[in-house]
Amino acid sequence: MPHIIVNYSANLIDLDEVQLLERINSTLLDSKQFVEQDIKSRIFKDQSFLIGINLPLEAYIHLKLYLLSGRTAEQKKQLGEALLQALKIKKYLQSESDFKTQICVEVVDIPKENYFKSTV
């Protein structure tokens, strides 16, 4: 733990997925709350998406950070804000798009009693 799931709109055609995941993992390591081998990140391109109905073309990046319960509200806030800042530095985009990109981070608690893990 933690688990990170990133979804992004397919119109971000120049997004470097590996670079983005490395940036996220580095940000989490910098927080000193996790050890490297516990951070599991994955990313998905949403081929079909719609923002509004009659709005100008936009894009999005939505990051979900799943954590085991027990962290304080302040710790979760710091993690969410640090990840948002990391996403705002768009080095993972090879070129700037002509449209706005909505960037958001969602921090989700998983109750410890509902999480099961084994290494085989």
Image (tube, helix red, strand yellow):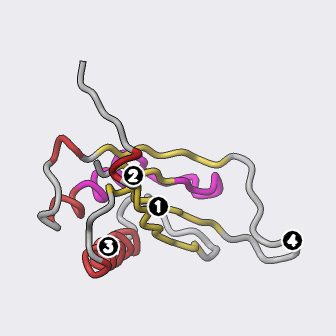
* Mark 2, secondary structure of its residue: strand
| Amino acid on which disc 1 is placed | Leu
Task: List the residue tagged with mark 2.
Answer: 4
Cβ atoms at labels 4 and 1 below 8 Å apart? no
Q: Is residue 18 magenta?
A: yes
Q: Specify whether 84 is left or right of 60.
A: left
The magenta segment: 7-25
| Amino acid on which disc 3 is placed | Lys
| Amino acid on which disc 2 is placed | Ile
Cβ atoms at labels 1 and 2 below 8 Å apart? yes
Task: List the residue tagged with mark 1.
Answer: 63
Cβ atoms at labels 2 and 4 below 8 Å apart? no
The residue under the point 39% across, 69% down is 87
- Of circles 2 and 4, the one toward us is 2
Q: Where is residue 17 shown, x and y percent of the image?
A: 42, 47
Task: List the residue tagged with mark 3.
Answer: 76
Earlier in the chain: of badge 2 and badge 4, it is 2
Disc 1/disc 3 C-alpha distance (Å)? 14 Å
Task: List the residue tagged with mark 4.
Answer: 53
Q: Where is residue 20 shown, x and y percent of the image?
A: 37, 55
Q: Where is residue 98 shown, x and y percent of the image?
A: 62, 73
Q: Where is residue 74 shown, x and y percent of the image?
A: 27, 81
| Mark 4 surroundings: few (<14), some (14-19) or many (≥20) residues within 10 A | few
Residue 9 in which image quadrant: bottom right
Above or below: residue 79 compared with residue 22? below
